[in-house]
Image (tube, rainbow, N blue to C red):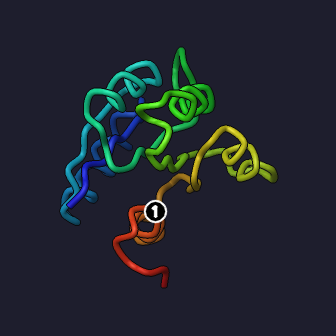
Amino acid sequence: MSKLLLVEDNEMNRDMLTRRLQRRGYEVVIAVDGAQGLAMAKSESPALILMDISLPALDGWEATRRLKMALETKSIPVIALTAHAMAGDREKCIEAGCDDFDTKPVEISRLLGKIEVLLGEKAPQ
């Protein structure tokens, strides 16, 4: 299975998502802020990045913009994770370079479907 980079500053969210994704066979590496996420995207070469938007210091919007500008990370799909599901958020995610977005609290079956589509592991349901 694929390696996923989870960029998430909330420990409870990290633990819950990591356990659920590992149970599905994914290898999960974790970054706790945007700057660490950028560094790990380069060093770990994940198949996909789950990017929390509300991060300290370097937020998920800016981290994603930088990932998509860098030659070595621009092709890695990014799913934004946000608790702020407002009108226009999907458009803002796409403008920042995200390939998709999902709302918190995460509904794992919906998120897995998006991961599988972006990784080409399974046809959309």
Q: Residue furthest front?
A: 71
At 27% from the left and 27% from the top, the residue drawn is 43
For label 1, the crowd category at 10 Å Cα-Cα, with few meaning under 14, some 14 to 19 and many 20 or more, is many
| Residue 24 in picture, x, y percent from top left | 23, 66
Using the image as rendered, state which of residue 97 and residue 107 is in the foreground.
Answer: 97
Is any atom of residue 54 visible in this view? no
| Residue 122 in picture, x, y percent from top left | 37, 77
Using the image as rendered, state which of residue 14 and residue 3 is in the foreground.
Answer: 3
State the SS at label 1. helix
In the rendered image, which quarter is residue 93 located in? top right
Is any atom of residue 33 visible in this view? yes
* Above or below, comparing residue 86 to residue 31 in the picture: below
At 41% from the left and 32% from the top, the residue drawn is 72
At 23% from the left and 53% from the top, the residue drawn is 19
Q: Amino acid at mark 1?
A: Leu
| Residue 101 in picture, x, y percent from top left | 58, 54
Q: Quadrant of the N terminus?
A: bottom left
At 50% from the left and 54% from the top, the residue drawn is 105
Q: Residue furthest bottom?
A: 125
* Above or below, comparing residue 10 to residue 104 in the picture: above
Residue wearing tag 1: 118
Q: Is residue 80 left or right of residue 3?
A: right
Q: Is residue 55 left or right of residue 16?
A: right
